[in-house]
Amino acid sequence: MTLKIYGIPESTCTSRVLTVLAEKGVTDYEFPPMGKGDMKAPEHLARQPFGKIPAIDDDGFVLCESRAICKYLAKKYANQGTKLIPDDGDVKGYGIFEQACSYEMSYFNPPAESICFEKLFKQFHGKGPADEQLVTQYKSKLEDTLKVYDGILAKQAYLAGDEVSLADLFHLPYGHLAKEVGFQDLYDPYPNVKRWFESLEARESWKTVPSIIALFARMGQAQEQAAK
């Protein structure tokens, strides 16, 4: 049975999974189309009880949450493509890897995702314009994280050492989108962060991921045409 990915290719969290599949050279998977109401349908809630995306069904093994899915894929396809995760026997390496993953989830993603919500998702879903005061606060929190990152990355190429890992790739969706919604110079004051993030954006795996900005543009155009 073929691996099935349930999500929207352009979505931030789904793009994490697609990036890892590309890094691993996995092409044999299906992407069943999902409509607007499908995330709350009973069959999807059985895969993802919170009604979010992505989720996978790998020959009957069902898993949700993008970071968990990526770790599963990195272990399943450990012998092909980019390594991305330490060997099972490398206990210290795995501890450092999980530490870096925690940095992303605790200190980077919350403010980056909040910026994107205010500047893009909020307005698109008709919840009013961005609260620029909140955006400023979130940007300040993100900059506090980037200052720390810059010190870490002054000593090593990536957050978990000198080899790229999932901990780095996890930053791409919201780290890239935050630039796209108005902060193109976000990483400029932090030379080590800038070098690191540009190297991630330059990876062939990331270049294959569809743009969420393009998706919202198409949806906006469709809404305009329907209103005419």
Image: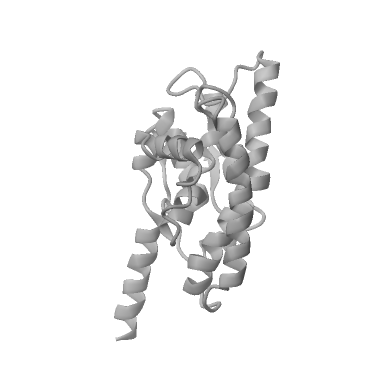
Q: Where does the C terminus fall, quadrant-wise? A: bottom left
Residue that protrudes farthest toward the front in the picture: 189
Please identify the residue farthest to the top as the structure is shown: 89
**For this rendering, which residue is in front, 212 or 28?**
212
* Residue 55 x/y as whole percent: 56, 46
**Relative to residue 24, is residue 58 drawn left or right?**
right
Q: Where is residue 193 in the image (x, y as percent from the top left)?
A: 50, 39
- The residue located at (60%, 71%) in the rendering is 133
Above or below, 56 against 42 in this view is above
Residue at x-position 48% and y-position 66%: 120
In percent of the image, x 34 and y 34: which residue is there?
Answer: 204
Render colour scheme: one colour
Say whether residue 204 is left or right of residue 40: left
Q: Which of 140 and 45 is in front in this view?
A: 140
Residue drawn where x is 45% and y is 24% of the image: 82
Count the marks: 0
Q: Residue furthest bottom?
A: 228
**Residue 181 screen position, x and y as percent:** 44, 61
Can residue 46 be seen by looking at this rendering? no
Closer-to-camera residue (7/136): 136
In depth, the one of 110 and 211 nearer the eye is 110
The location of residue 67, given as percent across then percent down, is 59, 40
Asked whether the viewer can see residue 180, the reply is: yes
Would you place residue 227 above or below residue 157 in this image? below
